[in-house]
Image: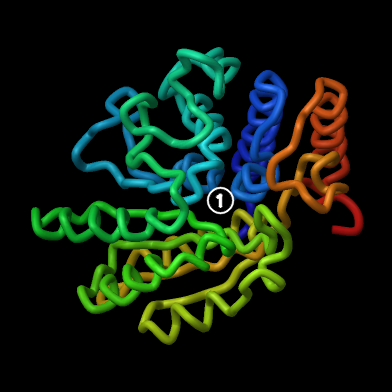
Amino acid sequence: MPQSDATIRLSAEIRIQTIRALQQAGFGHIGGCMSVADVLAVLYGGELNIRPEQPDWPERDYLVMGKGHCGPALYSALALKGYFPMDWLETVNQPGTRLPSHCDRLKTPGIDMSTGSLGQGLSCAAGIALGLRMQNRSNRVFCIVGDGELQEGQNWEAAAAAEHLHLNRLILLIDENKRQLDGYVCDVCGGDPAGKFRAFGWNVVRVCGWDTGAILREIRVASVQTSAPSAIVLETVKGLGASFAEREKNNHYMVITKEMADEAVMEIHRRLAAGTYPAGEGV
């Protein structure tokens, strides 16, 4: 499935707004926020069945951001979609904000689950999917997790239960950006997430994590599965799209100055004009 210009532009705007929000805060989880921008653009570019003017609409698709520290990227998508005013983004992680550094469903319109304690997102998403099925509803439930996050054992209890319960409306999106807080995933506690979920009986596929057309295609394939949950492994690059983060090995959490943000935004526009966005040359 080809990439649409509208989705590409949305992913660029998600990156830009996230960079500016974290610049305003002075610091933040820039690496993971950048690597989920493209899948968020696919979801909020029209794939999710949602009503921004009615965030708690019962028939909506649900999204659990398991890697809750990437809340700022999700907030950018929500603001661009119209869930709340764009100027809220200037308050990310500030005192009194409705946009904390980690997702909080009691504060932010459009957030379906409070997250940040890594490893709990998939369990929550499986519980939502089971509850919806018990109500004879067919809402899809999406969950975004990181590959480092999958080191938490609770994920695998949830994976086993979701397959046993045939939660076919559950779609897991794995941000395989290969890094975590204290190094490379393969050095800390690596593994093959695709192989593991396949062994648990899930439908599994791998795609380029910034190919929005491929992501959309696999989400639609997963949406018509009838007997098992699906996992889509997104092969991403941590920090992709923020040039200062791309150059930094330890880019999980960074101080972000105006100069750094200005450079990154200019580079995004340059890559868009050159037709190389988001990766640029050599990535």
- At label 1, which amino acid type do we have? Val
Relative height, residue 254 to residue 158 (above, below): above
Q: Residue 158: give x, y in percent of width and height.
A: 32, 68
Quadrant of the rendered structure where residue 213 is?
bottom right
Q: Residue 182: give x, y in percent of width and height.
A: 70, 56
Instruction: List the single residue furthest toward the bottom.
Output: 199
Q: Residue 60: give x, y in percent of width and height.
A: 27, 42
Q: Residue at x 61, y 73 (%)?
A: 189
Relative to residue 53, is residue 78 drawn left or right? right
Relative height, residue 260 to residue 152 (above, below): above
Q: Residue at x 47, y 46 (%)?
A: 43
Q: Residue at x 53, y 31 (%)?
A: 101
In the foreground, 61 or 220: 61
Relative to residue 129, is residue 194 drawn left or right? right
Q: Quadrant of the N terminus?
A: bottom right
Q: Quadrant of the C terminus?
A: bottom right
**Crowd band around label 1 with a 10 angstrom C-alpha radius: few (<14), some (14–19), many (20+):** many
Q: How many marks?
A: 1
Relative to residue 44, is residue 273 drawn left or right? right
Q: Which residue is mark 1?
A: 39
Instruction: Indicate the colouring scheme.
Output: rainbow
Instruction: List the single residue furthest toward the left.
Output: 135
Quadrant of the rendered structure where residue 188 is?
bottom right
Relative height, residue 165 to residue 176 (above, below): below
Q: Residue 3: give x, y in percent of width and height.
A: 64, 53
Relative to residue 50, is residue 87 drawn left or right? right
Q: Residue at x 56, y 50 (%)?
A: 39
Q: Secondary structure at mark 1?
A: helix
